[in-house]
Image (cartoon, rainbow, N blue to C red):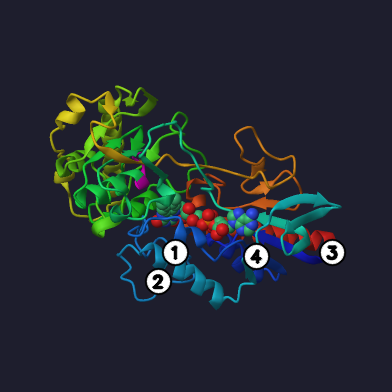
Amino acid sequence: MTEEIETLVIGGGQAGIATSAHLAKQGCPHLVLERARIAERWRTERWDSLVANGPAWHDRFPEATFAGIDPEAFPGKDQVADYFESFARQINAPVRCGVNVTRLERQGDGFRADTPAGSITARNVVVATGPFQRPVIPAVVTEPDLTQIHSNAYKNPAALPEGAVLVVGAGSSGAQIAEELVRAGRRVYLSIGPHDRPPRRYRGQDFVWWLGKLGKWDAKAPTPGTEHVTIAVSGAYGGHTMDFRRLAALGVTLLGRAGDYRDGRMHFAPDLAANIENGDRNYLSVLDEADAYARAQGLDLPEEPQARHFLPLPACVTDPVLALDLQSESISSIIWATGFQLDFSWIDIDIFREDGRPHHKDGVSTVPGLYFIGLPWLSCRGSAFIWGAWRDAERLAAHIAQRALAQAT
Ligand SMILES: Cc1cc2nc3c(=O)[nH]c(=O)nc-3n(C[C@H](O)[C@H](O)[C@H](O)COP(=O)(O)OP(=O)(O)OC[C@H]3O[C@@H](n4cnc5c(N)ncnc54)[C@H](O)[C@@H]3O)c2cc1C
């Protein structure tokens, strides 16, 4: 059985729901197909204690606030999922859950999407299947009795076998998971690569506020050379700056970038001090830019000179461990907080670059009628974040409405 719809949105996360909201505003008939539930990744592919990285006043759609949450607080992951679900209900979004699109291809001047429940043809398709699709695990560790999971499968400390834990990757996920584990009494090793670590708050304002004021959310592309630099921020425990010296003081052993695994030993690059120094430099640059902005704008914000004081470098940084014998250190688990890849293998359309990203301009692909939303740096730095997806959805829905108009005349 083949169904027909003008615009098909694939994926019912925040990007798919935002797209539906804007298509409805434009009067464009559409259908959203979601293989599981609305905001499924927030429900089941995040750890139990995860809170949003931005406060409730920021990490939301402009048209709906978080009910019953202090705007300065960081909503929990289920509160975020509930928020999208209730927003979808409120706007009466035409979402069909439990329908997996297994194949998308061109048909005539439109598209055909195959699902186990039949096929759907559409003149336009918006792919909203997420910025973080397939977990990446970069090294092969063959150690019997060792639990290895990606950060998207980590739930809580009690769900790991007893013993020490090696967390590889110190972006927001790895850093937050390492902190949770050490606070739970685990012995923790954390492998740290190049990272930015902006201050959580400075001069009374959250860093997401500063990023807005400094125009950084609107950046069109990462600064050349920083494409692989992760960002370590946290809203956990009320929100604090991710400071690796503080994690070391809590008991975490910091390590350089993870290399290969040989003869029962995991090897680490001798780059820990440099990574920490570059992270500090990034932190201080945000303070400098914020100070310059406050001065230029004549903002009356409290000075915060103590924000420039660092704890001394811990011994694990000045005298780093370059190889770890997993067994003798009683490491029973590795958590790979090493990021994600895109996976568009189910799209049978010749539109992808070698790195797996589609050829597009701000989400409008080179195939007429095919759109992408929610990808990192789709139109700007904000694109993979909640409010950024909203803004991109508004633009793409307008493009789709224009196209429908042009086709009708
Ligand atoms: C640990 C973590 C924390 C984050 N915290 C924040 C934060 O605090 N604030 C913020 O703004 N951003 C945050 N992000 C970034 C981003 O907001 C989330 O990744 C968000 O889930 C992206 O929403 P999305 O709708 O683009 O994609 P997803 O949430 O991934 O939604 C895509 C949907 O598509 C469905 N789908 C996939 N393939 C198919 C298919 N073939 N057919 C049908 N359905 C399909 C999936 O089931 C899923 O529900 C975080 C990301 C991670 C990994």
Q: Residue at x 44, y 64 (%)?
A: 60
Task: Locate residue 75, reporting x and y percent.
Answer: 35, 64
Where disc 2 sits, the SS reads loop
Alpha carbon of mark 2 to alpha carbon of mark 4: how far? Answer: 23 Å
Question: Left or right: 231 with respect to 391?
Answer: left
Q: Residue at x 77, y 62 (%)?
A: 120
Query: Compared with residue 82, is residue 145 higher up or lower down, i.e. above or below?
Result: above
Task: Locate residue 383, reporting x and y percent.
Answer: 52, 51
Q: Residues within 10 Å of mark 4 (few under 14, many from 20)?
A: many
Amino acid at circle 1: Arg
Q: Are marks 4 and 1 in contact (CB under 8 Å)?
A: no
Is residue 335 one of those drawn in magenta?
Answer: no
Sequence-first disc among 4 and 3: 4
Sequence-first disc among 2 and 1: 1
Image mark for residue 32: 4
Where disc 3 sits, the SS reads helix
**Closest to the observer, 300 or 96:** 96
Give, as a single range, the part of the protein colored magenta: 169-173
